[in-house]
Image (cartoon, helix red, strand yellow):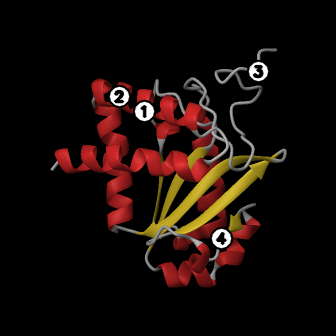
Amino acid sequence: MKTDQFTTRKPLGLEKGKVMLVPYNKNWPALYRAERKLLKAKLGKLAVAIAHVGSTAVPGLSAKPILDIMLAVRSLNKAEKNSARFKRCGYRVKPRKEDPVTGRIFCSKDTDGLRSIHLHVTEVNSRFWKDHLRFRDLLRKDPKTARAYARLKFRLAKRFPHDRTAYIEGKAKFILKVLCKSF
């Protein structure tokens, strides 16, 4: 079995903190739908909306083999008070005071010891919610922008293979530029 940056043994899973890109996997949408079904069943009305975001939500785009799911709630405070419900779905919930990203509660799920899902809980119609959906939709509609984003991600993954924070920060300027151009 090959072990280069383009091969993975499973459709999901990556060591925590590691950055490795794999080719788009046609199973990612089905894996998202299965997780969405679980979240809807376990969270009920707490979940106002659920969306597949990030590179795994863009057909043809290489990505880290980790699903990014965004879950909208009416109130982050209420969601935080109900964190046990996320834990019952198999998620680890990061306390908001420890998360450098404002406007969300970050949850993660591991499968077979590998990080497989990032769940971003945010308020419905918040800037966080709108920006993530808009960026995903722009990448889906504009192949030129998606290719430029892929090239940047590969450069950053090569430069920061064990520093996910630096990788994420390296993408921020590009994402902001794309979002600003779309208005």
Which quarter of the picture shows residue 40? bottom right
Residue 154 coordinates in the image, percent (x, y): 51, 29
As drawn, 24 above or below 161: above
| Nearest-to-viewer mark from 4 and 1 | 1
Label 2 near label 1: C-beta < 8 Å?
A: yes
Separation of marks 2 and 3 at Cα, in angstroms: 25 Å
- The answer to whether residue 182 is seen in the rendering is no
Residue 100 coordinates in the image, percent (x, y): 52, 69
The mark that comes first in sequence, 4 or 3, is 3
The mark that comes first in sequence, 4 or 1, is 4
Q: Which residue is mark 4?
A: 94
Q: Which residue is mark 1?
A: 152
Q: Which residue is mark 3?
A: 3
Query: Which one is in front, 81 or 164?
Result: 164
How many other residues sit within 10 Å of disc 1, few (<14), some (14-19) or many (≥20)?
some
The mark that comes first in sequence, 2 or 3, is 3
Q: Which residue is mark 2?
A: 148
Separation of marks 2 and 4 at Cα, in angstroms: 32 Å
As drawn, 131 above or below 126: above
Q: Residue at x 82, y 14 (%)?
A: 1
Q: Amino acid at mark 1?
A: Leu
